[in-house]
Amino acid sequence: LRGRTIVNLFAEDSTRTRISFEAAAKRLSADVINFSAKGSSLSKGESLKDTAMTLQAMGADAVVIRHSASGAAQRLADCHWMSGSVVNAGDGTHEHPSQALLDAFTIRKHLGMGGTDLTGLSIAIVGDILHSRVARSNVLLLSMLGAQVALVAPPTLLPVGIHNWPATVSYDFDSVIPHVDVVMMLRVQQERMGELFFPNAREYSRYFGLNKDRLAQMKSTAIVMHPGPMNRGLEITADSADSARSVILEQVTNGVSVRMAILYMLLAGSQEIGATE
Ligand code: NCD
């Protein structure tokens, strides 16, 4: 991607996703501009439209956007403010497609039966489904690839209309855990919780946390995943996060490759190299 300019527009905090997209773009020799809300005119109240038009004027070939508003990436992609590609790096509580792709890739590497899909695998997604864009994108992708998805959470952390999702729902982690091939834990998103969704942290961990006892109930081949950042001691104990079953750091490694593929497919050969100069 030499000669292409990729802008990382992060209007919400991020460690892994931002660094991962940056590493992916740099490994493909693109020019990368990191633009975070703090320290930019976004924090002075500039609109997304003005920001997008400014990026267009600077010749950005792609914008990787993370935004607290659900639908922000779609808005940018559908508008005529800029002509480059738009990659959704997480929009509010809506979607996080590159995370789902790297999760599916990690699952396939560990448990794939040789085919390209995930047919026959059973996957539990556990925790704060209500606020999780990771859960929404994974439910869509994993079910599309043929996996059976079980959502496990307290009723207060499940969105309205959950029964229309292509997944089963359970409030009982212990009854689900012995039957699944993958346990995907989600972060309790305290920053999106304006009110109380469960009585206290101890009770949450006891019913919905992954710990040594639950780890022992898993199938011998089953793996543990978490998109990060983790609240160690809340949704996952340190010994579970660091256990031999955990593929959490592999998810991070695979994220770079998957994002390289995304950027390459969007940008390579789309125009003459150097045409934007
Ligand atoms: C997730 C996110 O930001 O949606 N993290 C990530 O991208 N690796 C999940 C989270 O914040 O809990």
Image: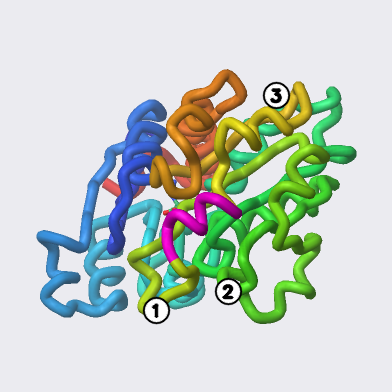
Tally of numbered tags:
3
Foreground mark, 1 or 3, reads 1
Number of the label disc, if any, that sits on residue 195: 1
First of labels 1, 3 by sequence position: 3
Q: Which residue is mark 2?
A: 156
Query: Is residue 25 placed above or below 14 in the rendered structure?
Result: above
Residue 272 x %, y %: 44, 42
Residue type beneath disc 3: His
The answer for how far apart the CA atoms under marks 2 and 3 are is 33 Å
Left of 274 or right of it: where is 153? right
First of labels 2, 3 by sequence position: 3
Q: Which residues are magenta?
A: 200-207
SS majority, magenta: helix
Can residue 30 be seen in the rendering of this structure?
yes
Query: Is residue 274 placed above or below 200 in the rendered structure?
Result: above
Of 123 and 13, nearer the camera is 123
First of labels 1, 2 by sequence position: 2
Of 225 and 170, nearer the camera is 170
Q: Which residue is mark 3?
A: 110
The answer for how far apart the CA atoms under marks 1 and 3 are is 38 Å
